[in-house]
């Protein structure tokens, strides 16, 4: 299936190489093709006003509100059956259409409420929105081509503009939910006293209503599937397409969220909370009809993005897609607190505190509580502290956490606001980490915990890995690490800038210290080298799991990108459990459990070797562990083994050289002998 936004314009020639895609300028061969592409983009820009007018006319010829609800079902059906990258942008276009509905005069929309219309209207509107999306994408490419990319800051602005238009993914629910709860749950009493409801109740309401609507949609789909099974097979392709379209329209018609006469009453009953409380909550979630007359383009701020309930005439309302609320829940909470300065201050403080605590908790789950320190201070001028420090024999990670908010003007790529946030999220954090690493490298080692006790760091500490964690998802900063002009220093080995949700995801997938440390070190080095460019952390993780992607310094006039997607990671976190379904396995590094066990032994018995061995073991390609896997099988303590297996076991006992930095020896768990001495490049594995 062609991507929702189209194939784009090939300004550069792709060369695929070992999980990487190298894009090189077309040079002299562009000629006529280049001018044809520019003409295509120019025509796309000219089509935008016409397409918007057709979208409005198509909506008002039917029922704009009901169409919005049915579009969500149509989009959800497609998203559930297609890879994520294929449908990228579709949810943003449905949201944009909802914003256009709230931009229309309220009386026009209400006059059409309940009007009967042909199901073809749904497909016509869907087609127009896709055409508009592709035209917007081409128009944005034209803008990028006109303005060029003279520096990283310009590239950040362009990427922010693209995300404002098309990207609505803030992370996976498994990470977004605990983040929201960590920040809002401690404010329950304060927010209830000021707002008349607790902030965390919004997600509870969204979850409940989403479950209710999902059950409704499931029943409808079952009925239609049963009905379609009774139909005689269609002979021709056109007939089959017509039947499929009819069934799809039927599911969208009967499975769409309804206009509720009393949404607060539904929520109050299901959640067993006071009706008045839910009235106040729903009021804070509503974008009323006629409230956004200035909304004209996909790049404009759309209130419906974070206030997702369309308010009709009191008390009727529509919450079309409550399952997506989690992606904007924190921004909604900030909006809800905005007119109450004391509550907003407490909310912002809890953002920072919650960000630091979740970083600490995630890293402690990997490295252990003993080696993870929160808020350790050192005696430099100003008594600076380290938000989170991992210090174990063989591994040091310094983390600066930024819980600040990214404003709407910054999301729209207003240059002055982006520069301000660059200085806050990137420049200041890099300088702080550089200062901390310089102190640790000095060997003074005098650190104090938050309760003023002296922290004794272990011996055998290697150079620190620098990490910046932002609560806000600002992928353009992570991709380009722009310079806002206030950077006094930066770590010499690079810095991994990652959003909190992605750090939690990586820590959930890479649960062994060696795995996480090697990945973090690689990501920092990639940022320093400038390649491959990483736009989505899940893609980088997938590339590392599959190909052990390494830093690449691009040649002049070359851009190096990842050529692998994150479908395995997506499937793991987005799989919907149904009767008889099998949950996808957690993606893993491909490193044998026996290797990780051996690294644990090294950590306890010869910690001075752990760093080099961990890096070497995690640099081995997953498929290159095959001879070690065979040797482990051959070394199992069994009564009868084949002659070939005995020969393989003898070779493994003498060592399997996987790289100049790593030789693996294999012994049975019952064999107490070991190669002597074990050098810094030797790893002894025992069967389990």
Image (cartoon, rainbow, N blue to C red):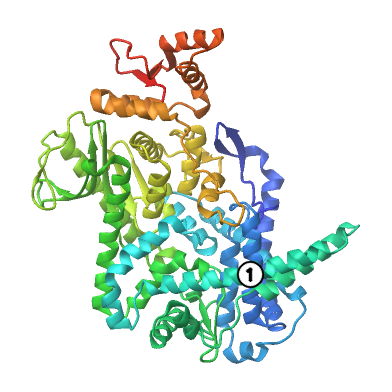
Give the residue furthest to the front.
639
Q: Which residue is mark 1?
A: 217
Residue drawn at 36 percent across, 48 percent down: 497
- In the rendered image, residue 447, in percent from the top left (x then y), is placed at 12, 43
Which of the 4 image quadrants contains residue 345?
A: bottom left
User: Which quadrant of the structure image shows residue 521?
Assistant: top left
Disc 1, SS = helix
Which quadrant is home to the C terminus?
top left
At x 56% / y 41%, what residue is drawn?
564
Point out residue 472 in the picture as x, y percentages from the top left corner.
Answer: 37, 59
575 with respect to 466 (left or right): right
Quarter residue 176 falls in: bottom left
Q: Residue at x 46, y 9 (%)?
A: 651
| Left or right of 511 in this view: 102 | right
Q: Residues within 10 Å of mark 1 (few under 14, many from 20)?
A: some
Nearest the eye: 610 or 592: 592
Name the side, left or right, on which 562 lies relative to 281. Answer: right
Q: Is residue 532 above or below residue 308?
A: above
* x then y, percent, for residue 329: 42, 68
Q: Position of residue 244 (x, y in %)?
A: 78, 63
Q: Residue furthest right?
A: 235
Answer with left or right where residue 278 lies relative to residue 448. Answer: right
């Amino acid at each position: 299936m062609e991507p929702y936004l189209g194939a784009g314009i090939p300004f550069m020639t792709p060369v695929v190489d070992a999980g990487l895609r190298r894009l090189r300028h077309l040079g002299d061969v562009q000629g006529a093709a280049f001018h044809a592409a520019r003409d295509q983009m120019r025509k796309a820009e000219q089509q935008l006003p016409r397409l918007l007018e057709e979208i409005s006319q198509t909506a008002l010829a039917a029922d704009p509100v009901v169409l919005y609800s049915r579009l969500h079902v149509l989009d959800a059906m497609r998203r559930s059956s297609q890879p994520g990258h294929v449908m990228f942008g579709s949810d943003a276009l449905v949201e944009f259409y909802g914003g256009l509905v709230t931009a229309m005069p309220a009386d026009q929309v209400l006059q059409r409420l309940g009007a009967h219309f042909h199901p073809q209207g749904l497909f016509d509107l869907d087609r127009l929105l896709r055409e508009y999306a592709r035209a917007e994408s081409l128009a944005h490419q034209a803008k990028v081509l006109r303005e060029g990319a003279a520096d990283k800051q310009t590239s950040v602005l362009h990427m922010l503009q693209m995300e404002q238009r098309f990207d609505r993914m803030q992370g996976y629910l498994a990470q977004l939910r605990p983040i929201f709860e960590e920040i809002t749950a401690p404010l329950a009493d304060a927010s209830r006293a000021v707002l008349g409801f607790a902030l965390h109740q919004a997600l509870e309401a969204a979850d409940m209503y989403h479950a209710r609507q999902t059950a409704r949609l499931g029943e409808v789909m079952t009925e239609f599937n049963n009905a379609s099974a009774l139909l005689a097979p269609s002979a021709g392709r056109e007939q089959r397409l017509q039947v499929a379209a009819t069934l799809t329209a039927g599911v969208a018609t009967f499975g769409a969220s309804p206009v509720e006469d009393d949404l607060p009453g539904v929520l109050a009953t299901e959640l067993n909370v006071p009706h008045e409380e839910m009235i106040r909550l729903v009021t804070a979630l509503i974008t009323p009809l006629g409230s956004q007359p200035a909304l004209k383009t996909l790049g404009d701020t759309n209130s419906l993005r974070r206030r997702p309930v369309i308010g009709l005439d009191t008390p009727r309302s529509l919450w079309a897609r409550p399952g997506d609320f989690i992606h904007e829940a924190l921004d909604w909470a900030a909006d809800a607190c905005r007119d109450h300065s004391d509550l907003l201050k407490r909310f912002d403080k809890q953002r920072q505190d919650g960000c630091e605590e979740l970083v600490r908790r995630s890293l402690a789950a990997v490295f252990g509580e003993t080696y993870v320190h929160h808020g350790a201070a050192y005696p430099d001028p100003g008594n600076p502290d380290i938000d989170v420090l991992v210090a174990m024999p063989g591994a040091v990670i310094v983390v600066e956490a930024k819980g600040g908010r990214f404003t709407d003007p910054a999301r729209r790529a207003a240059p002055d606001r982006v520069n301000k946030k660059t200085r806050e999220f990137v420049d200041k954090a890099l300088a702080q980490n550089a200062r901390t690493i310089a102190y640790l490298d000095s060997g003074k080692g005098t650190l104090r915990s938050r309760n003023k006790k002296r922290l004794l760091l272990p011996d055998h500490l290697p150079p620190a890995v620098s990490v910046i964690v932002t609560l806000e998802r600002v992928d353009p900063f992570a991709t380009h690490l722009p310079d806002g002009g206030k950077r006094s220093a930066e770590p010499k080995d690079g810095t991994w800038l990652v959003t909190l949700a992605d750090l939690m995801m990586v820590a959930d997938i890479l649960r062994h210290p060696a795995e996480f440390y090697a990945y973090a070190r690689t990501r920092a080095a990639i940022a320093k080298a400038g390649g491959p460019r990483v736009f989505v952390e899940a893609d980088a993780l997938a590339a590392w799991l599959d190909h052990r992607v390494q830093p690449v310094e691009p040649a002049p006039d070359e851009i190096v990108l990842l050529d692998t997607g994150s479908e395995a990671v997506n499937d793991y976190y987005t799989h919907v459990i149904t009767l008889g379904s099998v949950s996808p396995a957690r993606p893993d590094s491909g490193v044998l459990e026996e290797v990780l066990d051996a690294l644990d032994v090294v950590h306890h018995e010869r910690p001075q070797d752990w760093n080099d061995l961990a890096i070497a073991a995690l640099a081995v390609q997953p498929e290159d562990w095959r001879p070690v896997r065979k040797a482990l099988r051959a070394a199992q303590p069994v009564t009868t083994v084949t002659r070939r297996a005995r020969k393989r076991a003898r070779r493994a006992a003498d060592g399997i050289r996987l790289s100049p930095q790593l030789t693996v020896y294999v012994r049975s768990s019952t064999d107490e002998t070991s190669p002597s001495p074990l050098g810094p490049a030797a790893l002894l594995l025992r069967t389990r």
